[in-house]
Amino acid sequence: MQRQETGVTFKGSPMTLLGESLKVGQHAPEFNLHYYEGGLKSLTLDDLKGKPSLVSVVPSLDTKVCAIQTQRFQQDLADLGGQINALTVSLDLPFAQGRFCGENEITMSTASDYQDRSLGLHWGLLIDELKLLARAVVVLDSDGKVVHVEVVPEVASEPDYDAALTALKSQLA
């Protein structure tokens, strides 16, 4: 597995990202995520195609910054309704994601990379030392091509919401 020379930090400590980093212009690598909706279901890249997508990647929904990020994107994307896909991905179990969403009135879709970490590895977002996902925001066009990617340099910091939203809204014209 490729290790990225330039990783991220977690509370100031350098971390190593596994996999090859995403680049604007490339087609997003495949993944197989899971979510709970009356049973355990799978979500793949093909499920996102047909609409522009914002994929918000967080280490764990049960942490303050991850909760803020998810709530902020839900609020900012509410007026776009069915024009886009909005997805938060973490390694939390699908059942824990459901609990978090219920307790926090989150209606934005969530999916878990817990089974094989395919999104984390294929998108270059798996932190080797922590075995958690790095904080990132990726915007895809309706064909699954990367139009924006931000891997937040300090995992405990929030992403650039405005840059991600601008990139997403540019796909709606």
Image (cartoon, rainbow, N blue to C red):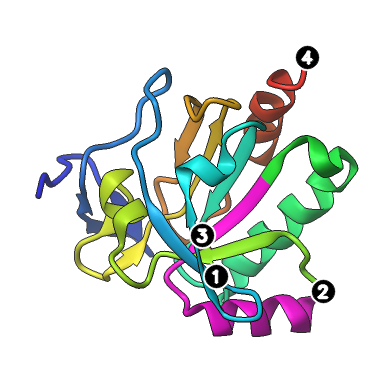
* Mark 4 lies on residue: 173
Residue 118 position (above or below residue 54): below
Helix, strand or loop status at disc 2: loop
Percent of width and height locating residue 99: 66, 85
Type of amino acid at the residue the image marks with label 1: Tyr
Q: Give me the C-alpha separation between circle 2 and circle 4.
A: 30 Å
**Span colored in magenta:** 86-104
Pick whichever of labels 1 and 2 is earlier in the sequence.
1
Seen from the viewer's position, the closer of residues 111 and 120 is 111
Q: Give me the C-alpha separation between circle 1 and circle 2.
A: 17 Å
Question: Of the residues tagged 1 and 2, which is closer to the observer?
Answer: 1
Percent of width and height locating residue 143: 53, 25
Type of amino acid at the residue the image marks with label 4: Ala
**Residue in the image at 27% along x and 71% along y:** 130
Q: Residues within 10 Å of mark 1 (few under 14, many from 20)?
A: many
Residue 42 position (above or below residue 87): below
* Mark 1 lies on residue: 35
* Mark 2 lies on residue: 105
Residue 146 position (above or below residue 136): above
* Mark 3 lies on residue: 89
For the C terminus, the quadrant is top right
In the image, residue 64 lies in the stretch drawn in magenta:
no
Q: Do the residues labelled 4 and 3 touch (CB within 8 Å)?
A: no
Task: Say left or right for 168 vs 4.
Answer: right
**Residue in the image at 47% along x and 37% along y:** 150
In the image, residue 91 lies in the stretch drawn in magenta:
yes
Q: Give me the C-alpha separation between circle 4 and circle 1.
A: 31 Å
**Residue in the image at 65% along x and 75% along y:** 37
Helix, strand or loop status at disc 4: loop
Pick whichever of labels 4 and 1 is earlier in the sequence.
1
**Residue in the image at 71% along x and 19% along y:** 170
